[in-house]
Image (cartoon, rainbow, N blue to C red):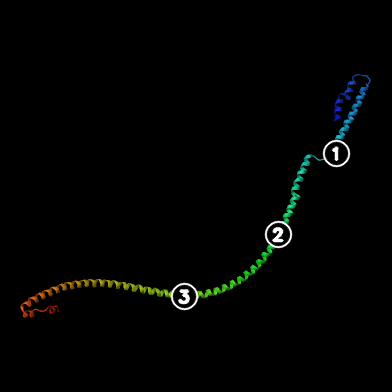
């Protein structure tokens, strides 16, 4: 930066401008300060060229030893993504390892329990097979008993049908007898009514006859009393109440 400021201060003393200015005065000698100025300009130009070379060398060196920030950021992002995809933290690894060990322990316990359950299952299967055979034997015996019972039931059913038929006939006869008895009862009731009516008639007739007999007895007694007063002859001619009653 100091060289650039010196260059800007030296620009009013450019050699080309000085040559143009001094070329107008023909035959004049070159002053000392002009020569010094020209040398100073040459030094400045050489320093500027050196600075440019240093800049170029520095740029090349930076390009060789450093990378652009965008590329760096992209590289960092790619690395972070790859780290998330391909790597895990040590703490997560320890947790997963502990979980794996616990799962292996659980698997060992489950395997032992499965072995125990398998043994129990085999024992149960053997028992089931034994019970199945026993059930088959009982089933065969039951089927045999059922067949015998079925035959017996058919016989009993046939017998029951015969008994039902006989019962139906008896019931029919009973119904007929009941009808006959009912008619007889009605006839007896009718006869009882007739007998009662006749009894009433007979009682009435007996009552009338009793009254008539009493009258006759009274008349006969009266006549006897009159005849006894007239003498024995008259009494013989009048019949007694007993003979008259007979």
Give me the C-alpha separation between circle 2 and circle 1. 62 Å
Q: Position of residue 136 (x, y in %)?
A: 59, 72
**Residue position marked by numbered label 2 in the rendering:** 107
Circle 1 SS class: helix
Circle 2 SS class: helix
**Residue position marked by numbered label 1 in the rendering:** 61
Q: Position of residue 189 (x, y in %)?
A: 27, 71
Local packing at callout 1 (Cα closer than 10 Å; few below 14, some 14-19, many 20+) is few
Residue at 72%, 56% in the rendered image: 102
Give me the C-alpha separation between circle 3 and circle 2. 67 Å
Give the foreground label among 2 and 1. Answer: 2
Give the foreground label among 3 and 2. Answer: 2
Left or right of 30 on screen, residue 99? left
- Which sits earlier in the primary sequence, circle 1 or circle 3? 1
**Residue 60 against residue 39 in the figure, above or below:** below
Circle 3 SS class: helix
When asked about the image quadrant of residue 187, the answer is: bottom left
**Residue position marked by numbered label 3 in the rendering:** 156
- Which sits earlier in the primary sequence, circle 3 or circle 2? 2
Q: Of residues 167 and 120, which is closer to you in this image?
A: 120
Q: Of residues 175 and 9, which is closer to you in this image?
A: 175
């Amino acid at each position: 930066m100091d060289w650039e400021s010196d260059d800007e201060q030296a620009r009013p003393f450019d050699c080309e401008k000085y040559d143009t200015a001094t070329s107008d005065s023909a035959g004049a000698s070159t002053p000392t300060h002009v020569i010094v100025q020209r040398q100073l300009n040459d030094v400045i130009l050489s320093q500027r060229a050196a600075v440019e070379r240093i800049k170029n060398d520095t740029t090349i060196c930076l390009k060789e030893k450093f990378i652009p920030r965008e590329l760096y950021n992209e590289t960092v992002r790619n690395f972070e993504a790859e780290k998330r995809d391909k790597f895990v933290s040590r703490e997560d690894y320890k947790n997963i390892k502990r979980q794996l060990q616990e799962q292996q322990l659980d698997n060992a316990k489950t395997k032992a329990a499965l072995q125990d359950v398998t043994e129990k299952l085999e024992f149960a299967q053997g028992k089931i097979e034994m019970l199945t055979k026993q059930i088959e034997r009982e089933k065969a015996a039951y089927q045999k008993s059922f067949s015998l019972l079925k035959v017996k039931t058919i016989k009993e059913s046939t017998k029951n049908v015969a008994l039902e038929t006989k019962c139906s006939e008896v019931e029919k006869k009973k119904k007929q007898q009941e009808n006959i008895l009912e008619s007889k009862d009605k006839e007896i009731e009718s006869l009882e009514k007739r007998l009662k009516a006749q009894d009433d008639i007979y009682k009435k007739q007996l009552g009338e006859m009793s009254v008539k007999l009493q009258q006759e007895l009274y008349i006969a007694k009266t006549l006897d009393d009159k005849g006894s007063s007239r003498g024995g002859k008259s009494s013989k001619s009048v019949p007694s109440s007993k003979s008259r009653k007979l």
